[in-house]
Image (cartoon, rainbow, N blue to C red):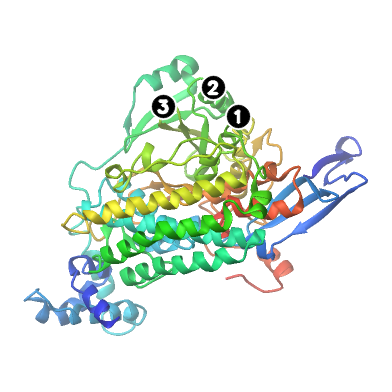
Amino acid sequence: MAERYNFGAGAGGVNVETTVLGADEIILNMGPQHPSTHGVLRVKLRLDGEKVVGSECVIGYLHRGVEKIAEHRSYQQFAPYVDRMDYVAAVSNGLGYCETVEKLLGAEAPPRARVIRTILTELQRIASHLFWLGTHALDIGALTPLFYCLREREEILKIFEKYCGARLTTHAFRIGGLQYEAYDELEKDTERFCKDFDRRVDEYESLLTENRIWVGRTKGIGVLTADAAIAMGVTGPVLRASGVQWDIRKSMPYAAYDQYEFSIPTGKNGDTYDRYLVRLEEMRQSRKICLQAIENIPAGPILGKVGKVLKPPPGEVYHSIEAPKGELGYYIVSDGTTQPYRVRIRPPSLINLEALDQMIRGHLVADVVAVIGTLDIVLGEVDR
Amino acid sequence: MTNDSEEKQPPRPAEAEKPAGTPAPSASPSASGGTPSGETPGKPAAPSAPVAAAKPPAAITPPKPAAPAAPAKPPGPPPPPKEAPPKPAPLDNDLVKRYKARFGGAVVEALLDRKQAILVIAADRLLEIARYSRDEEHFDLLVDLTAVDWPKREKRFDLVLNLYSFSKNERVRLKALVAENEPVPSVESVWPTANWLEREVYDMFGIVFEGHSNLKRLLLPEEWQGHPLRKDYDILQQDEAWVRENLGIESGQ
């Protein structure tokens, strides 16, 4: 948004960052304390009347140096930290981290653990999407869906609580498998939730999909073409809504996803409305995966043999999973000690947020709120 | 609820793994009950909690041997992977051959680590290689761009690019060795997403990208001094002057 200008020539000149505004333009600061930014995101908007002509994100308000902390913790000690990045989908974060370390060790989780991981991760995806739908609709002015969505999300959180005692930052998995055996009613609870859930999604759809205000506020807003999305490195539902049928669960299966049938929904127009439809369909597909998975949970151990002290042989590995927000990748370098030499986390939210600028150009200020919502960012993950 | 928590105890093969570091002191009290080894849900649970809590005082009171005993024990039975441990090996497949034919000596090394291809390339030809990777090898998604610091090496940084190809469903990692204060060409013109990623690397490591449209810190405040992810930047270190001036406190710790 701001440009650099040289004033004065030669060595005595200064290079200054300045924003030169047109006669009708103003700068509007949005956030970091603003209810629609879903955390501490600050966006500097350059406006012509009510039209956005430029923007700049200011992030880092929630930076905790997670990657630095990782270098000073053992592999097991770092595991709970990843839950605090995308705190709306902590189970997915944990799955990615545990699988990456397992790859680094050359170990694998036993089949039973992998299936239970899949069930919990898919429930987490539904919970994350529900939270997204509720808050996104709230931002745009539809109050009711929030209550419905949180009602269903609560049921999922109860399953997590019964499984591991925590609802939000669950630390549900361990490197090598699971720490806790599934509780007796896990299948029953999951089934009860899933049986009912399809009808619930219909309910949300009846509130929004053909709602004139909803359609008016989302159709054609924040369009991202497939090429632009790939160039911006966007992943997850945002990419799929632009028409790219790519899902890591299919293309490079992990956990137990290769055993289940599900489809990858895509959109056509890459606008806010399509992203809404894609996520709704994803919830239905996740429900399908859960139903298939509880049908046959293999017996056997839940924790593979990884040893008590983890000392991965020197080397490096990159592993990524399809988190609810997009590709969540971990790049871990080991120097053969008990602590990782370097942990790099590829957060989907950060890279999806980068596309915000080109998505809101030419739209109105009110649409900025809709686009931030549709990107489904979590600042804990953006800033780490 | 209480039923649940009791039922969670039995899976002890897993639970037993947890107090790995400090089993020595707790082993003796639980040894008597531990011999039958079957169902003694209460006992291991009870020691395992105090073990964690008792760790700090442990240094003062009796089990001073506990501290050395704990690290001493694990090295005894540390056979995590029983199969051949994974390690980097030279790689020479079609992909590598094509890169080598095209760029010759600029492809310094090709490795396979944990079944993942790594190309070590010359930093000054990064832009060229990046453009080739996108246009002709169809690595159209720059998944991630980051760095690793090896301060003892002559060229201390690894600049790491993780690429993905939709059409081939394949990943490759480009790695360029970069010295301190050595500028690297920006790949923003090839993959626009590199804009923020390079800013983050600049912020955290201080690597300067030439030709970047807006190279400034991404996460830390612009006036911050130092690059935290460098190995010589201590975990407790901070820009105290900045903290005092802007937060009005003595320390952020």
**Where the C terminus of chain B falls, by quadrant?**
bottom right
**Which of the two discs, 1 and 2, labels the residue nearer the N terminus?**
2
Residue found 39% across the figure and 52% down from its top:
A286
Report the amino acid beneath label 3.
Answer: Lys
Q: Give percent across and percent down for residue A79.
A: 38, 60
Which of pointers 1 and 3 indicates the residue nearer the eye?
A: 3
**Callout 2: 10 Å neighbours few (<14), some, many (20+)?**
few
Whether residue A258 sits left or right of residue A153 in the image: it is: left
Residue B65 in the image: x percent, y percent? 25, 75
Residue that numbered label 1 is attached to: B190
Residue B211, percent across and down?
69, 32
Q: Which residue has dot 3 on it?
A: B168
Q: Label 3: chain? A: B
> Is B142 placed above or below B54 here?
above
**Extreme residue toward the top, this view:** B101
**Amino acid type at image mark 1:** Val
**Image position of A336 (left or right of A72):** left
Q: Which of marks 2 and 3 is nearer the N terminus?
A: 2
For numbered disc 1, what is the local secondary structure?
Answer: loop
- Mark number displayed over residue B135: 2
Task: Give the distance between the C-alpha atoms of the residues marked 1 and 3, in whole angstroms.
Answer: 19 Å
